[in-house]
Each structure stands twice: as structure tokens, then as C-alpha cells.
Image: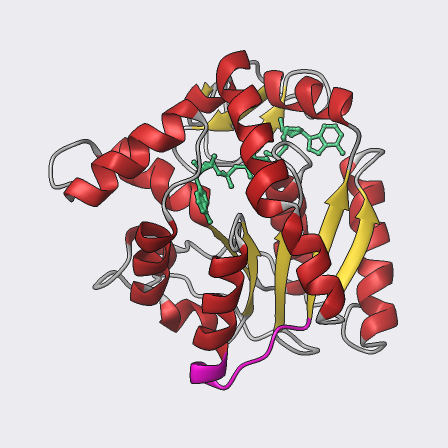
Amino acid sequence: MSDVNMKPDRAAWLKGPPAACNLPPTVPAGRPWRLVLLGPPGAGKGTQAELLSENLGACHLSTGDIFRAAKAAGQCGHSPAMVVALEAMRRGELVSDATVLDILRERTGCLRCRGGFLLDGFPRTVAQAQALQQLLDDQSVALHGVISYEIPVPQIVARLSGRRTCANCKAVFHVTARPPKVAGICDQCGGKLIQREDDRPESIRVRMEAYHKSTAPLIDYYARARLLIPISADGDPDEILQRTLTALRRLIPAAAG
Ligand code: AP5
């Protein structure tokens, strides 16, 4: 396990070119891990990605965070495709494959990041998975695994409705399961905690439908590719982290601490 004390700033990922990371990830002691985190909305992918990033040194690459960063930056300068994407996101629908893949292609440098990567929220359709494979082949890098977080539906609703996110650094909290030290204030940067627009009940329903229709088929897709690592997302975040690290250790014994 690498000793990573400072959080990479992810500027190249969140803003896209020409932005570069002011604080790129350090090169991990073992190997740069390249993983996809799969799971329904609210399974805890973002929470685990932050914990895994601290433990493995790999950069947390969330497509949802790209859209939220664009929204926070304001309408001014949004391309027509981004305006349509943000509207789809607000309703809980998936953004079109074409828009998501354009965004990914602009950021292929992040797939070669020296710290490795934890892709969160991408791919989300079989077409996106096929495009990712092509992009990785083009960069001569390989995925080590696809962690599939499994959780019963009632827990999903409880997690999403209590989620609070830092408007500034995007750190994720939960009003009861992972409360901040001071209500409404981010522990990490002092930013204001907000509720995501797509965590309203009507958007949660649409997101679950989109997951079952478009994203769940990726479980079979990656099982066939012998990359799937199923992990129960029941329990507290640290237990789930340990379960994940144990599974990664089995995959490559010396590399996951
Ligand atoms: P995205 O941001 O990817 O959202 P999502 O997949 O719906 O996942 P969430 O962020 O809601 O949940 P999570 O699994 O990360 O859970 P978290 O750790 O926050 O995408 C948002 C939207 O962007 C999409 O709907 C779509 O419109 C668009 N989009 C993005 N990528 C796209 C793509 N590739 N293609 C098309 N469209 C795309 O945890 C949830 C809560 O539970 C938190 O409060 C947390 O503190 C708490 N919690 C976490 N773990 C635990 C635990 N073990 N016990 C108790 N509470 C916990």
C-alpha cells in the first residue's frame, strides 16, 4: 500500500484540455492500478474510489464529477452538447454515448496517468465499454479488473437520500452513515455541503431504470472478459474497502498492500 498523504487535484480530468494537474498522483510503490468501479447509483462507488485512491495512489476519475464541475462553472461557455447532457443528468437519464465518449477521448492522457486510475461511472453501457477497450489498446495499457459493488435496493434509497456532497472539493458524506464533523461543512476543505439535484425521488427512480437497462449488462460483459471482481457493498465503508483490497491482493499478491 503506498503512503499517499496529499490528494491529487484531478484538474486534467475535471476540466479537460488544456488544464493540467497541479498535483499529479505520486507513483505508487507497487504498481499503478487501473480499475473500473461498477455498481448501481448509491452503491458507494465514489466513497470507495476516494478510499482506494488514498490506499493505492490511483486517481479517481468520475464522469459524473466532470458534469457536476461543468455545471458548477456556470452555463457560460457550455457547448450545446454539454447543455443537453446536464439536462439529461438532472432528470436522472444517461448522457448520450456520443457526448460521453467525446469527453473521454479529450482526456485519454488520464488513462496513461503514472498513478493509475479508478474509473467511476464509466463505462455505463456496452458501447462505452467497447470504446474504452479500444482507447486502452491505443494507449497500450490494460485494465487490471472491474470491481462490481453489489447492494440491495432499499439500502440504495437510504444512501442516496442522505448523501451530501462538498460543492467545492466534491468529497462525499452521509447525514447518518458518514456525517461531517460540523453539519453542512466539508471536513476536508471547509466547503458547503449540498444535496445533488439528481438525488430527488423522481430522478432516483429514472437512474435505477437506466442502470438496470443499460449498465447492469456490463456485469456479464466483464465476467466474460474475466475481469469482474464482485464485492458486497453491505457494511460500513472501511469494511468494504478491506474486502476490496483483499480481493485485489488475491489478484496481484504484492501490489495491494
Ligand atoms: P454518477 O455521478 O456516476 O452517479 P451514480 O452512478 O448514479 O452514482 P452515485 O454517485 O449516485 O453513487 P455512488 O455509487 O458513487 O455512491 P456514493 O459513494 O456517492 O453519475 C451521475 C449522472 O451523470 C448519471 O445519472 C448520468 O446522467 C451522468 N453520467 C455520468 N457518467 C455517465 C456515463 N458514463 N454515461 C452516461 N451518463 C453518465 O454513496 C452514496 C451515499 O451513501 C453517500 O452519502 C455516502 O456517504 C453513503 N455511503 C457510501 N458507502 C456507504 C456505506 N458503506 N454505508 C453507508 N453509507 C454509505
The reply to whether residue 78 is visible in this rendering is: yes
Q: Position of residue 150 (x, y in %)?
A: 78, 41
Count of marks placed on residues: 0
**Residue 227, quarter of picture:** bottom right
Query: Magenta segment, principal secondary structure?
Result: loop
Q: Residue furthest front?
A: 213
Q: Position of residue 178 (x, y in %)?
A: 69, 26
Q: Residue at x 64, y 16 (%)?
A: 175
Q: Residue furthest left?
A: 76
Ligand 1 quadrant assignment: top right
Q: Position of residue 172 (x, y in %)?
A: 56, 32
Q: Which residues are magenta?
A: 137-144
Q: Position of residue 18 (x, y in %)?
A: 21, 64
The reply to whether residue 146 is visible in this rendering is: no
In this image, 250 relative to 37: left or right? right
**Residue 74, quarter of picture:** top left
- Magenta span contains residue 242: no
In this image, 173 relative to 95: left or right? right
Q: Residue furthest bottom?
A: 140
Q: Residue at x 44, y 48 (%)?
A: 63
Q: Looking at the image, which is closer to me, 132 or 8? A: 132
Question: Please, which colouring scheme is shown?
Answer: secondary structure
Whether residue 204 is situated above or below residue 88 in the rendered picture: above
In this image, 17 relative to 132: left or right? left
Q: Residue at x 76, y 75 (%)?
A: 255
Quick one: quadrant of the C terminus?
bottom right
Quick one: quadrant of the N terminus?
bottom right
